[in-house]
Image (cartoon, rainbow, N blue to C red):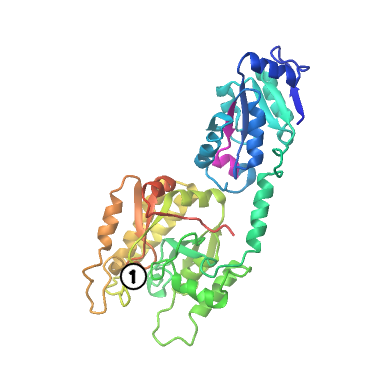
Amino acid sequence: MRHVVKSETDFRPMDKTADSIAMEVRKRRLRVFVSGCYDLLHSGHIEFFKQASQYGDLYVGIGSDATYLEYKHAKPLFPQEERLFMVKAVRYVKDACINEGVGIIDFLPTLDKVKPDVFVVNSDGGSEEKRRICRERGIGYVELDRAPHAGLQDRSSSSLKAGLAERDAHREPDCTDGIPTRLDIAGTWIDQPYVSVYHPGWALTVSLEPTFEVRDRCGLSTSTRNTIRKIWPYSLPKMAPEMLARLVFCFENAPEREAGDHVSGAQDAIGICVPGLSRHYYDNRFWPDKIESTTDEMTLRFLEDHLVLIPMEPRRPGCNVTAGKDINEEKVKALATAAEECWDAIMRKNLVAFASAFKASFIAQVAMFPGMIRPCGQDGHTPDEVHIQDTIDSYACIDGVLAWKLAGAGGGGYLALVVKDSSRFVLEHAEAISLCIRRK
């Protein structure tokens, strides 16, 4: 392994060798600092830690999720808390923390807190800026050639991720988990012309990766999802998302259906087929006048950080959530307003405003369709064993829960919650499901 030591300080002059540093290590224990993201921790990282720790007590600065996203334009496989836990568990590491800075030099605040004697980098991670930073602070600068541990393969995070992607591309598809599902966020029901005839407005949906068991009759558009499987059993075809949604909508609502059959709303097909967060504008027509969507990473991360699903009993066969509906201009306008405010809050990543609009949209839905919470059976009465409001109340009082709604048409299924921290909520509530929004 090649060691390059560079500094312009009295403590460690430019001509000081790695051997002389090792001698100082024996005289007194030095502080050593390294920094990186360490996503998908592998043997190459461990070997780097091992070599760096030979210079003294090793302190590691870890790139935050925000830095990772800015630098690599993608979400890390493991969130910062998990990466911190794994790095701290490595026996060569004295301590580690999440870097508080931003950009490529996000480690600067950590460096000034640790005040190391030596800064170690891999040869492909060195830079003149890092040398300058060390020179200005009197810190020794060491570059190590990237090399695997004896007898092991050379590893890098990039090559591992590429290998995983290649494996997935050739994996035999599973017909049960390849089709996305959708969660309605706000404004839904307005995709039905008998609602939007009173006032036009937006419906907001997100397309979800099926990372959990998507149960039938639970408000996540499983009827549309099952329709898609009849055409494409394994995965959605690669084509323009809006055109794909049109095809699905037309196939699901074929002219051969029985007279008087319910027409599935377009928000189901659009919510599944259009990646990311979408909003679609309805004005007394089955198909929206316009569709807008975003796959902005920070926006989708905001939603993932604050949304969870709670499984409930599925909607019972024969139950009617539209019985007793009461629709008028004022109520539909309230629904449309809540959807607009919800979109605006998400774009601003304002959690308080998002929760308020999310809740307002559900209140507007229930005002028009009380059967969402009190579904009628075939006899016109709510079954005694249906306790939807009790479930809502039990979660509404939990600390950290800011808003709630039933997924889809309600009557059971899933309860969607806006929470302060989805990761923590899922850890504290085993039944809760975290969401992964589809990026492409």
Looking at the image, which residue is at 58% across and 71% down? 244
> Is residue 203 visible in the rendered structure shown here?
no
- Above or below residue 396? Residue 260 is below
Q: Is residue 23 left or right of residue 367?
A: right
Q: Is residue 386 left or right of residue 59?
A: left
Q: How many marks?
A: 1
Residue 111 is inside the magenta segment: no
Quarter placement of the N terminus: top right
Quarter occupied by residue 312: bottom left
Residue 68 is inside the magenta segment: yes
Quarter occupied by residue 52: top right
- Above or below residue 390? Residue 120 is above
Image coordinates of residue 64 in percent, x first then y, are 55, 38
**Label 1 SS:** loop
Looking at the image, which residue is at 54% across and 61% down? 292
Image coordinates of residue 49 in percent, x first then y, are 63, 32
Q: Which residue is mark 1?
A: 315
* Residue stretch in magenta: 58-69
Residue at the top extreme of this rendering: 10
Nearest to the observer: residue 418 or residue 201: 418
Specify the amino acid type for callout 1: Arg
Image coordinates of residue 420 in percent, x first then y, are 39, 45
Q: Residues within 10 Å of mark 1 (few under 14, many from 20)?
A: many
- Above or below residue 140? Residue 288 is below
Image coordinates of residue 37 in percent, x first then y, are 60, 39
